[in-house]
Image (spheres, rainbow, N blue to C red):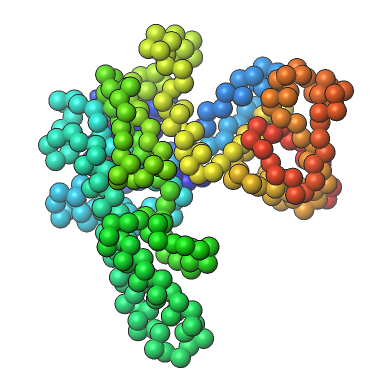
Amino acid sequence: MKVALIGLLQSGKSTILASLTGKAIPAIGSASIEEVIVPVPDERFDWLTEHYKPKKTTHATIDCLDVPGFNFTDDHGRAAAKRLIGQIRTVELFILVVRAFEDPSVPPYRNTVDPARDLAELQTELLLADLELVTTRIGNLEKQVHKPTRAQARDKVELALQKKLQKAIESEQPISSALETHTEREMIKSLGFLTLMPIVVAVNVGEDQLNEKFDFDDRVGSSVPVVTICAKLEYELAQLDADSRAEFMADLGIAESAASKFIRSCYSAFGLISFLTVASNELRAWPIKKGTTAVDAAGKIHTDLKRGFIRAETFSFNELQEYGSEKALRAAGKIRLEGKDYIIQDGDIINFRFNV
Ligand SMILES: Nc1nc2c(ncn2[C@@H]2O[C@H](COP(=O)(O)OP(=O)(O)OP(=O)(O)O)[C@@H](O)[C@H]2O)c(=O)[nH]1
Ligand SMILES: [Mg+2]
């Protein structure tokens, strides 16, 4: 999965990413997009590592783009933002990072800290970028539909659709709200509309705001996950060794780091689950879309596994924990031999049998 962290200047995007990787924060004011690979936290891993003692463990990862902050307050900033926005149209999820923390040493965007206003500005800019795209497309299609080409009928349908999308944007609605059918979605998929992208809102709060609730329903609708995160604190936590971190978190009354909550919310916003494999001394988590069949899941690992698929030897992590060992599971008849069309469940541990 590829996601982009976007936001206004200095909202804490790079610090959030550094807290997810444990690596250093890159210098402030970078002008180019950096790619950061973030491992997906999975509490099952610790138990499984203890149980199987594999030589190697490989977490599922999320490919995150750290996009330099947008500054829409002047022409130079707008031009830079436009260029950056052009480079993130192909990701699959946007994380909108807005600043709520007060800190006199970090000058706020437009001179005041106001997450709701910043979120509104970001969304308006995304809508404007889409409006530009839609308008250009309508211009082209209007010329094209008069030509008796093979695509004429299709062009007419698309033109009507684009006009509908234009209306939606003009009333400040995202493109996603105006699409009614799968066919419509397919028709415009390749254009890379920004407001078609699923989003997660990350509010970067101060240490004294950890329990504050932020309600942006009137802006983003209630289906958009909103997570609060104190990037600075999370970054400091990430620098500690595991024991001190656990102690520190217990002191603060935190059950799960906000960073890991944050990653999980991206995972679910994107409809992803993980299945696990234990083979050749490697424990590995594989991210797949909910609803993926066994044969397609096998294909994620290797095309040979898909081609020569015989059966998926499957049990769930929870059952393994309950019964204590694979041997006990086998004795209890809990190891299933699933066929090609079996729908993989989150936490399935799978050994693919194949023959090529
Ligand atoms: N007090 C406080 N400062 C923070 C927090 N998060 C980030 N900062 C500070 O804010 C400044 C900007 O943080 P970055 O993570 O570089 O923000 P950014 O969004 O990546 O910035 P640009 O890429 O330049 O837009 C740095 O000086 C951080 O130390 C926070 O939660 N609390
Ligand atoms: Mg940055």
The one of 267 and 235 positioned closer to us in this rendering: 267
In percent of the image, x 42 and y 52: which residue is there?
197
Residue at screen point 49% across, 14% down: 242
Of 204 and 159, the residue lying toward us: 159
Against 2, residue 321 (above or below) is: above
* 243 and 159: which is toward the camera: 159
Residue 91, given in percent of the width and then of the height, sits at 44, 51
Q: Residue at x 16, y 26 (%)?
A: 105
Q: Would residue 279 appear left or right of 267 to someone viewing this image?
A: right
Q: Is residue 161 above or below residue 342?
A: below
Question: Which quadrant of the structure image shows residue 353?
Answer: top right
Give residue 190's position: percent from left, percent from top. Answer: 46, 64
Residue 40: x %, y % from top left:
52, 32
| Ligand 1 positioned in quadrant | top left
Furthest toward the bottom, the residue is 148
Total marks shown come to 0
Left or right of residue 312: residue 292: left
Q: Is residue 44 above or below residue 176?
A: above
**Residue farthest to the left, as pictured:** 111
Q: Residue 144's spot in the image, x, y percent?
A: 39, 84
Q: Is residue 29 visible?
A: no
Q: Is residue 163 left or right of residue 105?
A: right
Q: Kindly give the residue lying farthest to the right in the view shown.
A: 331
Residue 223 visible in the shown view:
yes
* In-front residue for pair 2/262: 262
Q: Residue at x 85, y 23 (%)?
A: 332
